[in-house]
Amino acid sequence: MDFMVFLVTIVAFNGMALGNGTVMLSLVRKTFVEENQLLTADQLVYAFAISQVAPGQANLYVASIGYLAYGPLAGLLAILAINVPGALMIPVMCWYKRVRDLGVVRRFIAGLTSASVGLIFASMAEVARQALTQPACWVVFLSTLAFTQILRWNALVSLLVASGCGMLMMAFI
């Protein structure tokens, strides 16, 4: 895949997903992993995981993809490609304030929300299918889920404790 096609694709995906990195994940996986073999599924999961624990936007994993596929300059240009459309949204938001109470606009937003939830679910199911391949991975996943949802722990603390449990499990099994 040509570098310019990569950047245009990223801008298009970012616009369609309204900057939501998780929504973009299924589109990125299908295009860059399955269709063009620009990177492997493991590289995509790695890039996504790094972006989720690092501060900043949820769609910054696109910079990692650019870096992995084309080098450091591509990573920087990918960051620009995902940030410029957001800056262009400021004038659109001024217009939206005037029309947000119209029925057609409310229905459109409801449809976008439904589509986003579906894409997020599909993306997370694919990531889980690829990442949860060993018992220790399941221990970390289920422990984190239990700590955050049942015990109401902070997500980062839950992930650290669960990851420690997973590492201990890997060391002794």
Image (cartoon, rainbow, N blue to C red):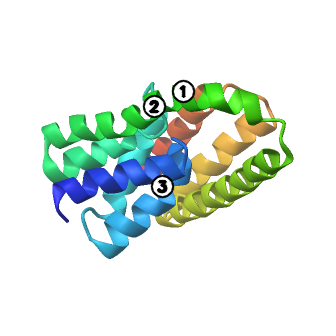
Mark toward the start of the polypeptide (2 vs 3)? 3
| Residue drawn 51% across the image and 41% down it | 19
The local crowd at label 1, few if under 14, some if 14 to 19, many if 20 or more residues have their Cα within 10 Å, is: few
Measure the alpha-carbon separation of dots 1 and 3.
Answer: 27 Å
The local crowd at label 2, few if under 14, some if 14 to 19, many if 20 or more residues have their Cα within 10 Å, is: few
Residue 106 seen anywhere in this rendered image of the structure: yes
Amino acid type assigned to the residue bearing label 3 in the image: Leu
The local crowd at label 3, few if under 14, some if 14 to 19, many if 20 or more residues have their Cα within 10 Å, is: many
| Residue 155 on image: x %, y % | 63, 30
Q: Secondary structure at mark 2?
A: helix
- Looking at the rendered structure, the number of numbered marks drawn on it comes to 3
Q: Nearer the viewer, mark 2 or mark 3?
A: 2
Measure the alpha-carbon separation of dots 2 and 1.
Answer: 7 Å
Q: Are marks 2 and 1 in contact (CB under 8 Å)?
A: yes
- For mark 2, what is the residue? 88
| Residue 124 on image: x %, y % | 58, 57
| Residue drawn 30% across the image and 34% down it | 80
User: Position of 100 compared to 50: left or right?
Assistant: right
| Residue drawn 32% across the image and 40% down it | 81
- For mark 3, what is the residue? 25
Q: Nearer the viewer, residue 168 or 99?
A: 99
- For mark 1, what is the residue? 91
- Vertical comparison of 173 with 33: above or below: above
Q: Secondary structure at mark 3?
A: helix
Measure the alpha-carbon separation of dots 2 and 3.
Answer: 22 Å
| Residue drawn 81% across the image and 45% down it | 106
Which quarter of the picture shows residue 92? top right
Amino acid type assigned to the residue bearing label 2 in the image: Leu
User: Position of 97 compared to 42: left or right?
Assistant: right
